Image (cartoon, grey):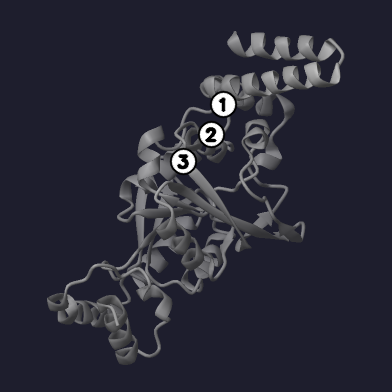
Amino acid sequence: MSLSKKLKSNLIGKYKKVNSSIFDSVIKLKINEKNQIIQEYNTCLTQNTPIKIFKMVSIIIPCYNVEATLEETITSVVGCGFQNWEAILVNDGSTDNTPKIIEKWTLKDKRFTVVYQPNAGLGAARNKGLQSASFDYVLPLDADNLLLPGFIEKALERFRKNNNLAVVYGQAELFGDKSGLWSPGNLEVFRMLNYNYIDACSLIKKKCFEKIGGYEENLPHQGHEDWDVWLGFIENGFDFEFLKMPAFKYRVSGNSMIAGFDEDMKNKNLYFIKNKHKKLYFDNYKNLYFAYVSLRNEKNSKPFITKFFNRIINKLKS
């Protein structure tokens, strides 16, 4: 039996009530660390604090006037099954009862911490959370959505198998104004270039944010920050993996950020994002153009296809 398996067996034997999945990330531990680890684990159980020797996740929850939903979101984190996390509540200048809810939970559970900033928007709030995050993996969670059990453990398993993996995401159970299951499927670059279909509530390797400078804070209208991040990850050659399992519950509401977009707001954001990532768009549409040229030669396609894609290339160049 390997050392990590022995340690796991000993600890589970000592603390039978604990879900054994939190031990799965123990690697390369020395024999003389055993007593220290058991002592730390015992302290953490008593004080309800995270265990730093194991894989840990920083959950980032931006909060701006979310008194109606925040309590439910926090409760979902506590009940997600995975215990080895910290949750960073970013108070983005709330003026309602949000600060009182945050204070209640930071006093109740030491895994919750709070950082404050004047209202600066979603991108800035998530970046504030990233700056405060202590651990290698982060999970952004909107303050009106709910984390579901099982996803974090499964996602961590995938990271152990692929060093180039940046994002693990799953399905979403819809609730509120709509019900059903949202299943985004695997990453398709052309689809992502057209529109975002992967929610921010994904498990992400924190160091990947360093390559792209974090979340965009200068969008004309907040609401497409996660799309910008995914495009940045694609530009850097990082991998995405889809888990066919519900990761979270997504609240469908007419009061959501995106639901309030009109056509002008949407177009301004689209122009900003596509201009920022224009090389990615150009390179991919250039490949698409050559694929269609090849198809034209093989199938004797009509000339308007060439003219159509020439116009796309010229527009992207400009």
Q: Tally the marks.
A: 3
Q: Work out whether residue 228 can be spotted.
A: yes
Tell me the crowding category of disc 2: few under 14, some 14 to 19, or many 20 or more residues within 10 angstroms, Cα based. many
Say few, some or many: other residues with alpha carbon within 10 Å of mark 3 (under 14 / 14 to 19 / 20 or more).
some
Residue that carries the numbered disc 2 in the rendered image: 231
Residue at 67% in and 35% down: 195
Rendering coords of residue 216 (x, y %) = 47, 32
Q: Quadrant of residue 212?
A: top left
Q: Circle 3 sits on which residue?
A: 238
The residue that disc 1 covers is 273
Give amino acid for label 2: Leu
Q: Are marks 1 and 2 in contact (CB under 8 Å)?
A: yes
Disc 3, SS = loop
Report the amino acid beneath label 1: Ile
* Location of the N terminus (image quadrant): bottom left
- Packing grade of label 1 (10 A; few <14, some 14-19, many >=20) is many
Which is nearer the eye, 83 or 252? 83
Q: Is residue 117 visible?
A: no
Where is residue 218? Give x, y as percent. Answer: 48, 27
Q: Nearer the viewer, residue 132 or 302?
A: 302
Identify which residue is drawn at 56% across, 35% down: 222
Q: Earlier in the sequence, mark 2 or mark 3?
A: 2
Q: Tag 2's secondary structure?
A: helix
